[in-house]
Image (cartoon, rainbow, N blue to C red):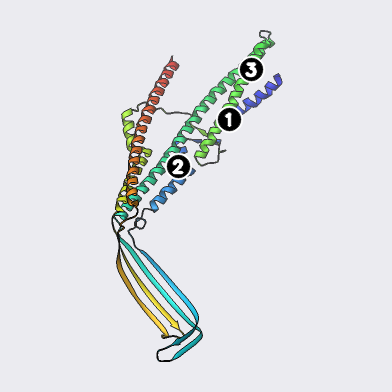
């Protein structure tokens, strides 16, 4: 049994010693700032969120809002083969078999909405707000992932500090085992004491292996957050700075002004308000201008005309005033107002939740700070 324990201990202690004494410059020692910088550049969720925000920005144009005209061009070329017989009042008769004719008709049409119940202006405001919301949602994704990076980094710091404590305990257990063996050789100790020392050493060794595995798992998670290979090896700086002068009121004020989730709720409320305005605009008439240029030429082997050619342009105004649509516009307006109320309630609920979260987090901070100060006083005694 001693041989088995000895082999196990040699393996465990060798691994622990190798990790503890591995040259720092052989791996990257990354600071929290470096972790965040890498994550902001390479994290996949952040990259996708930035693309979505860029799409919302690209969509914010006058054309998407409906301010600009539409211009289309079409062209048609056709051929016809007919058997034809023409009888005129004069008595003349003209006949043709397999008579060919053709027609060419290109045209261009421009349509421009001049007034649509103010919807184009409302649509532009909506696109502005959607671009703003896209930036806010990207910021939410960035902040959530940065929070995960910070939490993961300091969890690794905490676990590695615990790993150092376990190594020290393992070293003490090894010394107790050696001391017990020496005392047995001198006849001053029993095998029961040695077995207890071996049991303690085995327990500490198991804790060491478990903690080493836990640290590697945490590092793999942090690597993924940074957009790196999970097996990338690195060290962290074993220090945890403590801010001991935070106050509740300034924190709450800044949170209400800058919290991205609350800003998103406010943006959604604004979008719902614009939706109500659009629904009201559906009761107003539409006015549009159109113009077209047409060219037409045809040829025939038989008939009254050998060639017919015409070209020119048309223009005009169109007024559209829907009088009755089965009360759909009224229903849409009612629903839009309800959605606006819902968005406002959601904003109020989000604000209350934020106030609660800030308060509870601050109380946890104050409590943790008091515990740290108490532990520091105990260490000084």
Which residue occupies the foreground of this view, 46 or 84? 84
Q: Can you name the residue that lies furthest to the bottom here?
A: 91
Residue 316 left/right relative to 153: left
Whether pointer 3 and pointer 2 mark residues with C-beta atoms closer than 8 Å, the reply is: no
Q: Is residue 140 above or below residue 51?
A: above
Residue 117 left/right relative to 34: left
In primary-sequence order, the first of circles 2 and 1 is 2
Whether pointer 1 and pointer 3 mark residues with C-beta atoms closer than 8 Å, the reply is: no
- The quarter in which the C terminus is drawn is top left
Q: CA distance from mark 3 to mark 2?
A: 47 Å
Residue at x 33% of width, y 52% of height: 123
- The quarter in which the N terminus is drawn is top right
> Which numbered marker is on residue 213?
1
State which quadrant residue 120 falls in.
bottom left
> Which numbered marker is on residue 40?
2
Q: Position of residue 44 (x, y in %)?
A: 49, 44
Residue 28 left/right relative to 265: right
Residue at x 42% of width, y 21% of height: 372
State which quadrant residue 339 falls in.
top left
Q: CA distance from mark 1 to mark 3?
A: 21 Å
Q: Residues within 10 Å of mark 1 (few under 14, many from 20)?
A: few
């Amino acid at each position: 049994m001693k041989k088995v324990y000895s082999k196990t201990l040699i393996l465990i202690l060798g691994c622990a010693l190798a990790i503890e004494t591995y040259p720092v410059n052989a791996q990257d020692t990354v600071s929290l700032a470096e972790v965040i910088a890498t994550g902001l550049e390479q994290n996949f969720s952040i990259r996708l969120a930035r693309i979505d925000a860029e799409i919302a920005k690209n969509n914010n144009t006058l054309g998407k809002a409906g301010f600009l005209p539409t211009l289309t061009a079409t062209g048609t070329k056709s051929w016809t083969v007919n058997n034809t017989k023409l009888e005129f009042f004069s008595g003349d008769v003209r006949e043709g078999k397999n008579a060919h004719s053709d027609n060419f008709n290109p045209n261009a049409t421009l349509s421009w909405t001049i007034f649509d119940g103010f919807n184009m202006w409302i649509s532009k405001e909506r696109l502005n707000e959607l671009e703003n919301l896209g930036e806010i949602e990207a910021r939410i994704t960035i902040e959530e992932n940065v929070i995960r990076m910070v939490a993961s980094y300091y969890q690794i710091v905490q676990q590695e500090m615990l790993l150092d404590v376990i190594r020290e305990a393992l070293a003490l257990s090894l010394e107790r085992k050696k001391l017990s063996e020496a005392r047995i050789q001198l006849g001053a100790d029993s095998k029961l004491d040695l077995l207890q020392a071996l049991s303690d050493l085995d327990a500490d060794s198991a804790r060491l292996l478990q903690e080493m595995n836990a640290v590697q798992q945490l590092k793999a998670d942090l690597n993924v957050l940074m957009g790196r290979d999970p097996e990338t090896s690195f060290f962290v700086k074993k220090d945890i700075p403590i801010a001991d002068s935070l106050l509740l009121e300034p924190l709450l004020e800044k949170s209400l002004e800058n919290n991205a989730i609350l800003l998103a709720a406010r943006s959604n409320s604004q979008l719902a308000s614009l939706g109500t305005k659009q629904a009201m605009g559906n009761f107003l008439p539409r006015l549009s201008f159109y113009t077209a240029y047409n060219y037409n030429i045809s040829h025939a082997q038989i008939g009254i005309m050998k060639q017919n050619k015409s070209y020119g342009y048309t223009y005009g105004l169109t007024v559209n005033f829907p009088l009755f649509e089965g009360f759909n516009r009224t229903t849409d307006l009612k629903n839009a107002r309800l959605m606006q109320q819902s968005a406002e309630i959601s904003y109020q609920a989000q604000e209350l939740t934020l106030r609660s979260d800030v308060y509870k987090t601050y109380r946890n901070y104050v409590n943790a700070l008091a515990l740290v100060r108490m532990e520091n006083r105990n260490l000084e005694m």
